[in-house]
Image: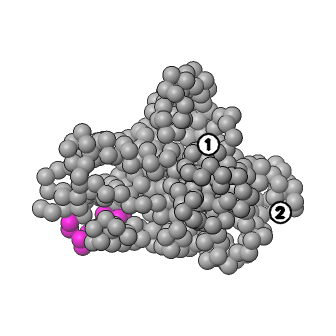
Amino acid sequence: MNHTGVLLINLGTPDAPTPEAVGRYLREFLMDGFVIDVPRPLRWFLVNVVIVPRRKIQSARAYQKVQLPGGSPLRVYTRELAEKVTEALAKDDHCVVEYAMRYGNPSIASTVARLCSPDVSRIIALPLYPQYAESSYETAVAETKRAARELDCADRLSFFPPFYDRPEFISAFARRMAETRENDWADHFVFSFHSLPERHLKRLDATHEHCLFKSDCCDQISAVNHKCYRAQCFFTARAIAAQLGLKQDDYTVSFQSRLGRAKWIGPTTEVVLRELAQRGVKRIAVSCPSFVADCLETLEEMGIRGRQTFIDAGGEELRLIPSLNADPFWVDTVADWIVGFRDQGGSL
């Protein structure tokens, strides 16, 4: 048979909300040189001596707050997306859909092993990261290629590119936010993206004089910054806001989830929430368009801690807009992307 294998890749999650399981997950995640880009001996010390012993307990408590009956939210929603995409492609009996986690289980290696069967002639990998970053998209690509090489099927691989600017993705998030926008519930909207160390952005700037050197460096996507994560985040936010009819003063773009003492891109979401409350903003709606599935960073960091931060600073209510998860429009979008990508020979 001439089947097409489809691999949906998300970041990862611990096997259980316990310090032991969280510690294993954090060690795998943080020992990735794409994530903490320092020499391996120093990375080993930072991860195993400084970060994990303290953070595994704190993170386990956070995971316990959002755990679902079927497991962690990220795994539950990613699995459901794969199942729904399988159903959407049921009429196309040449597609086999699997999902994997870059860190944790199901691993990329085990999933690629299932897809590298004699009746699968090609494999389309779709990393579920809208914006490009070495610590998300690139490491998923590298690990998938490594696993495929070991199984002698790397020549079957093709990768769907980051989709931060695709109209269907923009529409999917705008649809999630539409009800809150239409009933005028929110005084202000916040688009909160995962943050990155500034050096991750600067090293992709071949000119060494554009990225974060100019105040308007992220206002446009150009040949200089076409792989800039921050510029792509601003593009996504502007596009969603435009579709919702939001004016520039109606929303703020911010960045969350920083780790360590290095300088990370900002403004920081926690600071933005406090400043909005202190300005007299009473009700805000938060959307997180760097996450296509709800997870610890959306449900706990924003929905619980972010909400409390805003209220403690004088705000009245924070509404977290659900991520795309397995929303029918998003399911159909992913299914259509897969078919189109396959039929065009792995190009767009």
What are the residue bounds of the magenta stretch?
Answer: 84-94
The numbered dot on residue 226 is none
Q: For the residue marked with disc 2, what is the amino acid?
A: Val
Q: Residue at x 60, y 40 (%)?
A: 62
Report the disc number at residue 199. Answer: 1
Task: Tell me if residue 79 is in the magenta stretch.
Answer: no
Three-letter amino acid code of the residue under disc 1 = Arg
Element carrying mark 2: loop
Q: Quadrant of the C terminus?
A: bottom left
Q: Taking 46 as reference, is 3 left or right?
A: left
Q: Secondary structure at mark 1?
A: helix
Residue 197 percent across, percent down from the top left: 62, 43
Can residue 325 be spotted in the picture?
no
Q: CA distance from mark 1 to mark 2?
A: 33 Å
Q: Residue at x 72, y 56 (%)?
A: 214
Please state the horizontal and vertical placement of residue 295, each as a whole percent of the image: 53, 50
Of residues 320 and 237, the one drawn nearer to the viewer in this rendering? 237
Q: Compared with residue 346, is residue 211 higher up or lower down, i.e. above or below?
A: above
The residue that label 2 is drawn on is 281
The residue positioned 38% from the left and 61% from the top of the image is 160
Left or right for 330, reference 53:
left
**Label 1 neighbourhood size at 10 Å, few (<14), some (14-19), many (20+)?**
some
Query: Is label 1 or label 2 in front?
Result: 1
Question: Picture coordinates of residue 74 (x, y %)?
Answer: 48, 50
In percent of the image, x 77 and y 49: which residue is there?
271
Residue 87 is covered by the magenta coloring: yes
Quarter placement of the N terminus = bottom left
